[in-house]
Amino acid sequence: MRHKTPYKKRAKRLGCGIGSGHGKTSTKGHKGQRSRSGYRFRPGFEGGQNPFYRLLPKRGFNNAEFKTTYAIVNLDQIAAVAEKEITPELLVGRGIVKNLRDGVKILGTGDLKGAVTVKAHSFSASAKSKIEAKGGQAILLGK
């Protein structure tokens, strides 16, 4: 049989006789938990052996209440806005950021066309250096 360019494997037709290659036990072998209908194993299950995540010691407590989650914006997205001053409110208004969360973090992917003043809650080191290299300002906002 010749394959067409976007190769798509045929669906496994189960229980269609010995000639199909998937007859009788339908590729499930003989007896056992995995041969039964409704069988599903959860991630990390090791067949009754104590799973790896239970072998590792647990230390401390991470309070999710204090976690900061930033809305991420790259420099190439800022360059597309074509404004001299970029603020979180402007980014929300233009639809670049949908949810401000705990603030906006600027990352250094891409390049700017000219000098831009960017006001954000956090900057990566590469983003800050690229903004200042073009003669712009990276202004940190409070929470």
Image (cartoon, grey):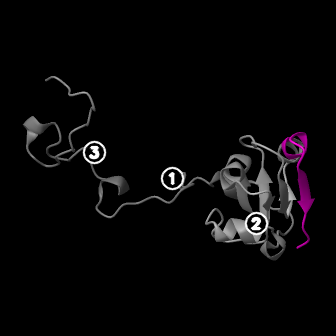
Which quarter of the figure has residue 62? bottom right
Residue stretch rendered in magenta on the structure: 130-143
Q: Earlier in the sequence, mark 1 or mark 2?
A: 1
Task: Report the front residue among 17 and 114.
Answer: 114
**Separation of disc 1 and disc 3 at Cα?**
17 Å
The quarter of the picture where the N terminus appears is: top left
Task: Please give the count of numbered marks on the rendered protein.
Answer: 3
Could you tell me if residue 107 is visible in this image?
yes
The quarter of the picture where the C terminus appears is: bottom right
Q: Are marks 1 and 3 in contact (CB under 8 Å)?
A: no
Q: Residue at x 65, y 51 (%)?
A: 80
- Image check: 47 left or right of 73? left
Q: Which residue is mark 3?
A: 29
The local crowd at label 1, few if under 14, some if 14 to 19, many if 20 or more residues have their Cα within 10 Å, is: few
Measured as percent of width and height from the top left, residue 128 is found at 88, 47
Amino acid at circle 1 = Gly
Q: Secondary structure at mark 3?
A: loop
**Separation of disc 1 and disc 2 at Cα?**
37 Å
Q: Which residue is mark 2?
A: 69
Task: Report the front residue among 42 and 6.
Answer: 6
